[in-house]
Structure formats: C-alpha cells, structure tokens
Image (spheres, rainbow, N blue to C red):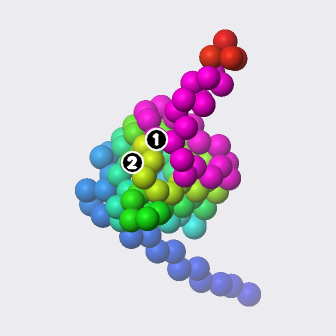
Amino acid sequence: MSADIAIDINLRKNQFLGTPIFNPHGINGIVVSQNAIIGKNCFISHQVTIGNSMGKAPVIGDNVYIGPGAKLFGDIKIGNNVRIGANCPVFLMCRIILQLFFRNLE
C-alpha cells in the first residue's frame, strides 16, 4: 500500500530577509502568515504556525530557532538569537518578565 502526500506552503518572495532553514523533517505542517517578516538564518521546525491575530503578524529577528509545534501569533517581535521551545505558544511580548527571570538565574 502506498500513499501520495501533497505538501503546500505559500510564501512571499520578500517575506524572508534571508534564506530560511527548514529542518530535516521537511516542511510538514508549517503555516506562515503572508504578513509575517522572518529574519536571516531562521530555523523553522515542522508543525510550526506563524499566524495573524487581529490583522497583525509576527516579526522574527535573525538567527532564531523555532522548535517543533511552536505557535506564534499576532503583533509580536521576536529578537535576534532567540530560541523558542517545542510546542511553545507565543502571542504576547513579555520582555520585562524574561529579563527578570534571567537576572534571577545569574
């Protein structure tokens, strides 16, 4: 028994500031809003959604790793050199909380 699987991903030419890096599992389940802006050298894992919320889409910096199943929505900005874990929902910018968290770790 065999099955043919159709994979479709629509991206705008100017949506990526550099060449995106998709993981070895392929582009299965990747959804990227046409309004999203993605920086250079971003690693996008399978089952990632980068979507609109209230008409706004994420702006993602350079050298960002987006883990499998992560969901990014809305008017958020992801800085450079950020790592987003597997299945992590990101829909609010929480820079102050993260700064406090990392200060407490040092």
Q: Position of residue 99 (x, y in %)?
A: 57, 24
Left or right, residue 99 beside residue 10: right
Q: Is 57 in the magenta?
A: no
Question: Element under label 2?
Answer: strand
Residue on which the image places disc 1: 78
Please provide the residue range marked out in magenta. Answer: 78-102
Query: Residue at the location (25% across, 56% down)?
Result: 14
Question: Element under label 1?
Answer: strand
Q: Is residue 63 above or below residue 57?
A: above
Query: Residue at the location (41% across, 57% down)?
Result: 57
CA neighbours of label 2 inside 10 A, class few (<14), some (14 to 19), many (20+): many
Q: Quadrant of the C terminus?
A: top right
Residue situated in front as seen by the camera: 64 or 51: 51
Kindly indicate whether the residue at mark 2 contacts the one at mark 1 (C-beta within 8 angstroms): yes
Q: Position of residue 104 (x, y in %)?
A: 68, 17
Question: At label 2, which amino acid type do we have?
Answer: Val
